[in-house]
Image (spheres, helix red, strand yellow):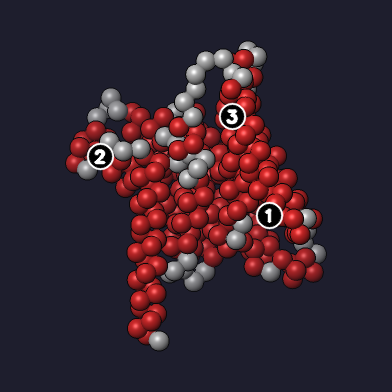
């Protein structure tokens, strides 16, 4: 870890500075949206959205390289695919309860398959590992600007509509009886989740996206007594895991995304076992 701190202070290693900044800024979106995802128990929807993102990335690479449409960047394709899939899975979860899992599973698989097919038809060679497993060390200044804008949007929306999101997550029927359009706010929450998922893909990749979105809020749920406390703890935990995992991966020459997730999962399992043990002893 000493080598990591020395490298971080080296002005030539700007990529590490960007990575640390991304970890801290992204944790705001992860902690807030991840709390709603965990409370509402829609991690499977977030999983479908994350895998559909790969279809948008593949389409963007095909249009950019194969068709010469230079402005259609992978991040734009990812955002479009995430938002469209969020609205689709949201409407499916509302109107197709009986076959919800089948339809969402289909969207999950088709999104990944379309991405691979588009990449197959794109001239040149593309490494899929950075999209599947993430690489926070490839963060650019433009990515940081995107994250700051997303944080401002999420914080602003949650402050304005906190009670409505709270009602949708905890008691949808009562909230509907109070005259609040629960369908709109549910879909709005899924769109915000989709934008956060796009951000997560840059850090830990499509395969591991659900872990960083749900594990910090799950740990925070052990100790928080209020929803805002759970959000705050989740933000702090996500920052801690991202920065620590980044330092460990740099020191041991490991992939950053999987290292961060393994760290999250290990801490969660240890705390879960400790809480179970304490509960058993006090029973």
Which label sits on residue 252? 2
Q: How many marks?
A: 3
Judge by depth and name the residue closer to the eye, 123 or 154: 123
Residue located 52% across and 69% down the image: 226
Gap between marks 2 and 3 measured at Cα: 31 Å
Q: Earlier in the sequence, mark 1 or mark 2?
A: 1
Q: Is residue 73 visible?
A: no
The residue tagged 3 is 116
Q: Is residue 193 left or right of residue 25?
A: right
Up-down: is 50 above or below 78?
A: below
Judge by depth and name the residue closer to the eye, 253 or 116: 116
Q: Quadrant of the N terminus?
A: top left
Judge by depth and name the residue closer to the eye, 127 or 9: 127
Q: Quadrant of the C terminus?
A: bottom left
Residue located 42% across and 52% down the image: 238
Q: Hey, which residue is sitting farthest top in the picture?
A: 68
Q: Hey, which residue is sitting farthest bottom in the picture?
A: 283
The image quarter containing residue 50 is top right
Up-down: is 66 above or below 230?
A: above
Label 1: state its secondary structure. Answer: helix
Which label sits on residue 101? 1
**Residue 266, image x, y percentages:** 35, 57
Label 3: state its secondary structure. Answer: helix
The residue carrying pointer 3 sits among few (fewer than 14), some (14 to 19) or many (20 or more) residues within 10 Å by Cα, namely some
Q: Is residue 256 visible?
A: yes
Up-down: is 262 above or below 226?
A: above
Do the CB atoms of the residues marked 2 and 3 lie less than 8 Å apart? no
């Amino acid at each position: 870890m000493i080598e990591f701190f020395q490298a971080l202070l080296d002005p030539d290693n700007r990529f590490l500075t960007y990575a640390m900044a991304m970890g801290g800024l992204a944790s705001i979106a992860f902690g807030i949206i991840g709390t709603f995802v965990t409370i509402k128990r829609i991690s499977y929807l977030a999983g479908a959205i994350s895998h559909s993102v790969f279809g948008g990335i593949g389409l963007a690479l095909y249009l950019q390289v194969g068709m010469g449409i230079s402005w259609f960047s992978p991040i734009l394709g990812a955002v479009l695919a995430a938002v469209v899939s969020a609205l689709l899975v949201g409407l499916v979860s509302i109107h197709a309860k009986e076959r919800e899992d089948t339809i969402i599973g289909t969207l999950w698989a088709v999104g990944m398959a379309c991405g691979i097919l588009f990449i197959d038809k794109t001239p040149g060679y593309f490494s899929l590992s950075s999209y599947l497993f993430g690489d926070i060390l490839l963060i650019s200044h433009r990515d940081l600007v995107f994250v700051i804008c997303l944080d401002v949007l999420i914080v602003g929306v949650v402050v304005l509509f906190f009670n409505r999101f709270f009602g949708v997550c905890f008691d949808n029927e009562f909230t509907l009886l109070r005259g609040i359009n629960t369908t709109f706010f549910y879909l709005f929450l899924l769109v915000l989740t989709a934008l956060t998922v796009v951000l997560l893909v840059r850090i830990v990749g499509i395969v591991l996206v659900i872990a960083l979105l749900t594990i910090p809020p799950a740990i925070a749920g052990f100790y928080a007594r209020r929803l805002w406390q759970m959000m705050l703890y989740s933000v702090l935990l996500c920052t801690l895991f991202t920065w620590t995992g980044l330092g460990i991966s740099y020191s041991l020459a490991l992939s950053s995304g999987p290292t961060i997730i393994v760290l999250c999962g290990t801490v969660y399992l240890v705390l879960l076992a400790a809480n179970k043990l304490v509960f058993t002893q006090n029973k």
